[in-house]
Structures are given as C-alpha cells and as structure tokens.
Image (cartoon, rainbow, N blue to C red):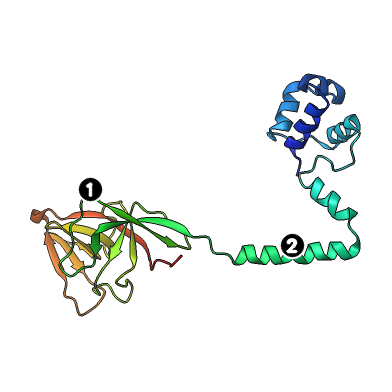
Amino acid sequence: MFSGERLRAIRLVNEMTQENLGKLVGVGKVTISKWESETTVPNAKHLRALEETFLVAKGYFESDFELLSIYHKLTSAHQGKVMRYSRRLLEEQEQSVQFVAYQVRTNILLSAGPGETFEDEFETETVYFDKEMDHDVATWIKGNSMEPMFQSGEVALIKETGFDYDGGIYAIVWFGHTYIKRVYREEEGFRLVSINPDHPDKFAFYEDQPKIVGKVVGHFMPLAV
C-alpha cells in the first residue's frame, strides 16, 4: 500500500515544496498534496518518477518497505526465526479477548417478582463482555420468571423503541415498577407473559397507564476481568 507519509517525509528532508516536486514528476501541487494525504495514490508511471526523483529503490513508497527491507537483509536462518515469532504473536493476538464495557443501571432490577422502579435518575456500575451490542439502557435481571431464556444476575440490554409487535420481550413500567415480559397488546391493555410456566400472566390495563420502555435486544452474564 502506498504511504503518503513516506513521500512527505522524504520531500521535506530534501527541502522540496509540493509545487517543485509536482513539476519534476509532471503533476500539480494539489496532486502531490492528495498523494501525501492518501486521498489518491500515484499510478505506476508517477510512482516510478517519484523513485527516480529521490533516487530510492523500487517499493520505497510502500508502507511496509522498511519492514521488508530489513527482513530481506537477514540470513535464511534469521528469517525463519522472524517468521516463527511473527506467527506466535499473531496466534496470541487472535486468541486474546477484547472486552467491551457496559454501564449498567444499578437501581433497576428486571424480572423481579413484583417489579422494580424505573428511575429517571440512576447510578451505574461498569461490567464487561466480549461482544458489543447496540442498546440504549443496560440493567440487571433478578428472579426466575423469564427462565430459561434469561437468568437472574444477567444484564438485559434494552432499545427504547416503544411497542413493536405482539410476543416480543419488552421492559414495561406499570404502577411504578418495571417488568421484563413477553407483551401482547389486547383491547383493554397489555398481557404480560412470563417464559417460566410457574409464573402466571399479568394484565396491565391501559387506564393504569402502563408504559413500554423498549424491546430487550440482548442479554449476557458479565465476565470477570
């Protein structure tokens, strides 16, 4: 890959302006500027002209030129050592886990038997997982009403979408408490269904002003780091 940084560096070392270099290789100073910022790259003809202008080896303006130049100067035995070490570093890099931080609201507990208050003001704590998932609110799950899909102690990720479709899993505020349930919209209100059959359905009448906070779009058990 062409390196605009290497072009700019050698031009400055030679105390040459973009305009002067452009005249030597047959382009305008705007083109030189674009090459240096890597907005565009020189074609084969102009690349050869740059190499001849600065009396450098073919490939000098490639971003990995220095690395390859050193490698090719090594003996075969030392090249082998470099390759083995590089492979080991690559394996370690691929096996390493990249942790993603989540800010979890600590004063909201979803799936708790009678529900928990969904506050406007809240405190958070940081937990980690190995996958990034889009969400608006992260909060703790407590209780077993949504087992086996959701486990107590997991983090629920909520997207503040409002109601979308029947049977989706939503966070809903009702009588000042928050639940995570399968929600079905009926003529007089929302039917709240637990996944665990040991927990009976609940019914939130519209006149009681239940509010769908959003859809649960993900959940995870935090990782120890």
Which residue corresponds to mark 2? Answer: 86
Q: Residue at horizontal 84%, vertical 20%?
A: 23
Which residue corresponds to mark 1? Answer: 121
Q: Amino acid at mark 2?
A: Ser
Nearer to the camera, 60 or 203: 60
Quadrant, the N terminus: top right
Q: Residue furthest bottom?
A: 198
Q: Quadrant of residue 2?
A: top right
Q: Residues within 10 Å of mark 1 (few under 14, many from 20)?
A: few
Sequence order check, earlier mark of 1 and 2: 2
Q: Position of residue 41 (x, y in %)?
A: 75, 36
Q: Amino acid at mark 1?
A: Glu
Q: Is residue 166 left or right of residue 24?
A: left
SS class of the residue under badge 1? loop
Q: Quadrant of residue 189?
A: bottom left
Is residue 49 shown above or below 103?
above
Q: Quadrant of residue 91?
A: bottom right
Q: Is residue 103 left or right of residue 37?
A: left
Q: Position of residue 162 (x, y in %)?
A: 26, 52
Q: Position of residue 90 (x, y in %)?
A: 68, 63
Q: Residue at horizontal 24%, vertical 63%?
A: 109
Res. 38 mark: none
Is residue 79 shown above or below 52?
below
Q: Are marks 1 and 2 in contact (CB under 8 Å)?
A: no
Q: Residue at horizontal 78%, vertical 47%?
A: 64
Residue 14 visible in the picture: yes
SS class of the residue under badge 2? helix
